[in-house]
Amino acid sequence: MAFDYKKEYREFYLPPRKPGIIQIPRMRFLAVRGQGDPNEEGGDYKRAIGLLYAVAFTIKMSKLGKHRLEGYFDYVVPPLEGLWDQEGGCGLDFTRKEAFRWISLIRLPEFVTREAFDWAVREAAEKKQQDFSPVEFFDWEEGLCVQCLHLGPYEEEPATLAAMEAYAEAEGFAIDLGGERLHHEIYLSDPRRCRPERRKTVLRQPVKRLAL
């Protein structure tokens, strides 16, 4: 049976709708950076997602080709994720989507080394006859966060984020956005197939402990 990160690491991918504090360890990702409105048809965000999935499935389906990746195990490609910020780095204004800066992510299995990543990018570029140079090998430790499951349209996230901030403060933490500490979303629902009111999105905000 294929290894499924969502099921094996439920604390990271299937949290409750009530906020909680969690420590996120170092993980490896495929990443593409950009800026602008993610809803723009034919825009950079949608192109970035296409690049990510092409490389992700090149790695997953390598089991059928001649190039064997050391330590390979069959797995379900993890869900799309995103890191988001805007100028100033102090939160998100959802009415100014054109000002979003984002890093789109797909988690990599542990057996994927930089050498395996480089091979997959070359392989995808050769097969697709496309430039995959924007795709990065992204090694990242998120650290201490408040997270919960948001159910509903993306536009209604501010209410959930406010509840997360209130919970964090009640528990002795403060939101810690800025620098490499970014607003994080994990998309458990395909927006092309799921009504907005049924969309499930994991929301995370970095936090720091308040001084006593």
Image (spheres, rainbow, N blue to C red):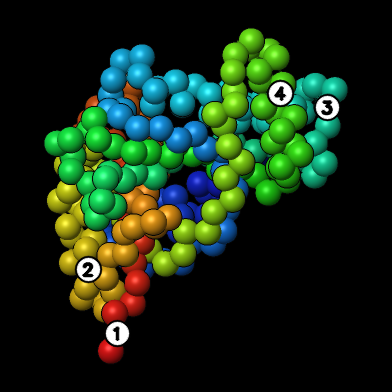
Amino acid, disc 2: Tyr
Disc 1 versus disc 4: distance between alpha carbons? 49 Å
Can you tell which mark lies on residue 211? 1
Disc 1 versus disc 2: distance between alpha carbons? 17 Å
Amino acid, disc 3: His
Which mark is in front, 2 or 4?
A: 4
The crowd level at tag 4 (other Cα within 10 Å; few <14, some 14-19, many 20+) is some
Q: Is residue 97 above or below residue 93?
A: above
Q: Secondary structure at mark 3?
A: loop
Locate residue 141 relative to residue 169 in the image: left or right.
Answer: right
On the image, the x and y values in percent for residue 2 come to: 65, 38
The one nearer the camera, 207 or 134, is: 134
Asked if residue 174 can be seen in this view, the reply is yes
Of labels 2 and 4, earlier in sequence is 4
The one nearer the camera, 190 or 119, is: 119
Which mark is in front, 1 or 2?
A: 1
Can you tell which mark lies on residue 67? 3
On the image, the x and y values in percent for residue 130 come to: 60, 14
